[in-house]
Amino acid sequence: MGRIQNNLVLFTLCLSLQSPIAAVAQSYPTSEQFLSVATINQDKLFTGSLFGKNFNEKFQNDANILVEENRRIEKELADEEADLTQKRKELSNAEFRALAAVFNEKVEIIRRDQAQKLNILNASRIQAQRAFFVQAQPIIVNLMQERGIQFILNDQAIFMSGSSGDITDSAIEHIDRVLGAGNLQPQE
């Protein structure tokens, strides 16, 4: 009987050891239970798309026009300042101060106007990106459904990932097929 009792104790011990292992093994998700997660680079999505390339080309042209305008104005103001400096020899202090005050106010108005043009130009980029992402969202949702993706994370918020989870290039291809170069008018 001692032998049967020992075997029974061993059998019970084995069962007790297997139960926690089975419980632990069942607590880990199987491959079917994992949620599909992908990453996307939002900057690359915009700049790599035909829409973004089209916008960036227009944006760069507008920025170059503003830079050239600023250079022209700067030269005109430098010439006007040099002329005013020459007149200083011929004018009384009161007359010169009055002309200098008018010139300084003109410079301040021009600076304010040019800064406002730059702000408008930069705001156009933000509006174009918003319009793009509004139009791209249903396309990306379709891509998610095609691939069984449950979540998309911005790749800048990820510490480490494999490149197989990055769908940016695929999303760009889908967006280009649907939107093409797009409409540069912001969507309200």
Image (tube, grey):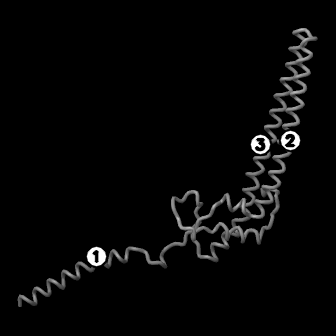
Mark 1–mark 3 CB contact (< 8 Å): no
Tell me residue 14's x, y (percent).
Answer: 21, 82
Q: Quadrant of residue 155?
A: bottom right
Residue 41 vertical placement versus 83 (above, below): below
Q: Amino acid at mark 3?
A: Asn
Q: Quadrant of residue 39?
A: bottom right
Classify the position of the C terminus by image quarter.
bottom right
| Horizontal arrangement in the rendering, residue 98 relative to residue 25 (left or right) | right
Q: Secondary structure at mark 3?
A: helix
What residue is drawn where x is 72% and y is 59%? 47
Classify the position of the N terminus by image quarter.
bottom left
Q: Amino acid at mark 2?
A: Glu
Using the numbered discs, state the Cα–Cα distance from disc 3 to disc 2 in whole angstroms. 16 Å
CA neighbours of label 1 inside 10 A, class few (<14), some (14 to 19), many (20+): few
Residue 30 vertical placement versus 102 (above, below): below
Foreground: 113 or 138? 113
Q: Secondary structure at mark 1?
A: helix
How many marks overall?
3
CA neighbours of label 2 inside 10 A, class few (<14), some (14 to 19), many (20+): few
What residue is drawn where x is 59% and y is 60%? 154
Tell me residue 174's x, y (percent).
Answer: 72, 71
Read off the residue under disc 2: 68
CA neighbours of label 3 inside 10 A, class few (<14), some (14 to 19), many (20+): few
The dot on residue 20 is 1
* Label 1 vs label 2, nearer the camera: 2
Using the numbered discs, state the Cα–Cα distance from disc 1 to disc 2 in whole angstroms. 75 Å
Q: Amino acid at mark 1?
A: Pro
Residue 147 vertical placement versus 41 (above, below): below
Foreground: 9 or 77? 77
Tell me residue 54's x, y (percent).
Answer: 80, 59
Q: Earlier in the sequence, mark 1 or mark 3?
A: 1
